[in-house]
Amino acid sequence: MLRGPATVNLWADDMEAAKTWYSELLGAQPYFERPGNGQPAAYYEWRFGDYETELGIIDRRYAPPGPDAPGGIVLHWYVDDVQAALDRLLELGAKPYMPLTEQGPGFVTASVVDPFGNILGVMHNVHYQEVLGK
C-alpha cells in the first residue's frame, strides 16, 4: 500500500527566509512556486536526492490546527555522513533536537529543528545503501 514518500511538507511563517534557507541546504532553487494571492509565495517545492523526493514548504497560515512546539513524526533523510550533515545544519542555524546516536550497526541518526520550527532528521542507514545497490 505505502510505496514511499511522495511529497514531504514543512511549514514556515517567513516564506522568503525558508526559501533561502532550504535553497542553501539543498544547493538548488525551488522548481515550483505557488503565489500567495498578492502576498509572498504560499508554497515552494524542490525535488532532490536519489529518488527526486519532493519537499514542499507551505506558508503556516495554511497549517491545520495543532501544537506550536515541534513534535509528531521525524522523517530521517539519508546522508552518507551524519556528523557532517549535522554540523552543516547547525552551521545554517538549525537547533539541536536529538543528538547523534548510534542505533545499531549501520544505523546512525540525529535531528534538528530548522529555523521555522520543523523537525529535520538525518540518518545513515545500511538498508538505504542496499536498495541503491551501493
Image: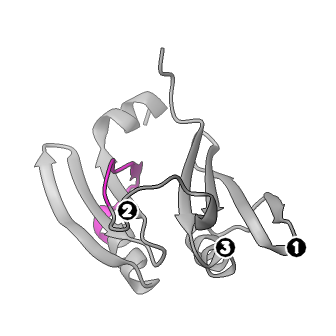
Compare marks 2 and 3 and give the one earlier in the sequence.
3
Q: Residue at x 58, y 65 (%)?
A: 60
- Would you identify the image quadrant in which residue 101 lies? bottom left
- State which mark lies toward you, 1 or 3: 1
Q: Quadrant of the C terminus?
A: top left
Q: Residue at x 33, y 47 (%)?
A: 73
Looking at the picture, how far across and down is residue 51, in whole percent?
59, 39
Q: Amino acid at mark 2?
A: Ile
Considering only vertical position in the picture, is 129 above or below 114? above
Q: Which residues are magenta?
A: 71-83
Q: Amino acid at mark 3?
A: Lys
Looking at the picture, how far across and down is residue 19, in whole percent?
67, 73
Given residues 106 and 112, the one toward you in this image is 112
Q: Amino acid at mark 1?
A: Gly
Looking at the picture, how far across and down is residue 45, in whole percent?
70, 56
Element type at mark 3: helix
- Would you identify the image quadrant in which residue 59 lies? bottom right
Element type at mark 1: loop
C-alpha span from label 1 to label 3: 18 Å
Compare marks 2 and 1 and give the one earlier in the sequence.
1
> Residue at label 2?
119
Seen as rendered, the residue at the extreme front is: 65
> Residue at label 3?
19
Judge from the rendering whether residue 108 lies leftward or rightward of residue 58; answer left or right: left
Q: In the rendered structure, find residue 38 and report the number of the disc placed on it.
A: 1
